[in-house]
Image (cartoon, rainbow, N blue to C red):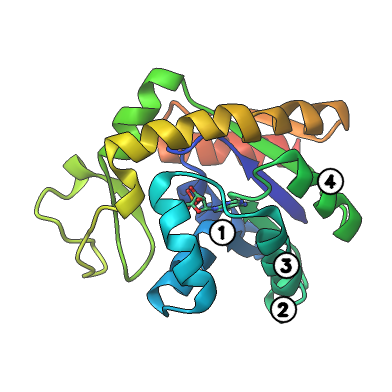
Amino acid sequence: MRLILLGAPGAGKGTQAARIASRYGIAHISTGDMLRAEIRSETPLGLMAKSIIDRGELVSDDVIIGMVKNRIVMPDCARGFLFDGFPRTIEQAEALEDICNIDYAIDIEVPFDRLIERISSRRMCPKCGSAYHVSAHPEGLCPCGGKLYQRDDDNEETVKNRLEVYGEKTAPLIEFYRTRGRLLTVNGDASVDTVEAEIARKLEG
Ligand code: AMP
């Protein structure tokens, strides 16, 4: 099974990706998580990517495609994988077509005016990677014990730019996969369990 999760920043891609990947025993590949790991390790790629990410812009297609090519040959991808945050441009989608076949691209739809509130209120766990609305754990502690933090690029100004970049560069991918007969659409403005169930139903239906 080879899947793509599409959707604007704040649509819930990361949360659903973790659930869907574990449900089907496939690898969860988040290019954003891979870049943040490079930043934490202070690699040359991480140092280059940090200012781009902090501005809400996109890292170059060549860098991302190279990262993905190296990732999908790893053993945990043998049963399949799910991309979260990739592809983000038509160029990346076209490059992916040359690398492997994708079964479905799942677009998680959330009304535009809900996205800014969702991202600005998002808190992340550094230990398990979960994302929560700030009101879920106001004391700032994840159930796994991690201390919740706000992503540097989840501030309101960067979020506005990320949403603009999404509309301009990434939203056209919906048509890209629709015309290839590989698009599934789910309503993301619902509980995490409901969205997961709808994704599973569409994949298995
Ligand atoms: P995410 O965690 O998916 O929201 O990604 C965080 C940031 O990483 C994005 O705003 C981009 O700056 C960068 N990024 C992640 N994935 C990609 C990609 N496929 N292409 C370009 N930039 C990316």
Name the secondary structure under disc 2.
loop
Which residue in the structure is indicated by mark 4?
94
Q: In the drawing, does residue 123 fall left or right of residue 46? A: left
Q: Which mark is residue 136?
A: none
Q: Position of residue 12 (x, y in %)?
A: 46, 41
Disc with the residue nearer the chain's start (2 vs 4) = 2
Mark 4 or mark 1, whichever is nearer to me: 4
Q: Position of residue 74 (x, y in %)?
A: 72, 78
| Residue located 69% across and 41% down the image | 89
Question: From mark 2 to mark 3, how far is it between C-alphas?
Answer: 14 Å
Mark 2 or mark 4, whichever is nearer to me: 4
Which residue in the structure is indicated by mark 2?
74
Answer yes or no: disc 1 within 8 Å of ligand 1.
Answer: yes
**Callout 4 amino acid:** Glu
Answer yes or no: disc 3 within 8 Å of ligand 1.
Answer: no
Name the secondary structure under disc 1.
strand
In which quadrant will I find the N terminus? bottom right
Q: In the drawing, does residue 144 fall left or right of residue 13? A: left
Which residue in the structure is indicated by mark 3?
66
Which residue in the structure is indicated by mark 1?
30
Mark 2 or mark 3, whichever is nearer to me: 3
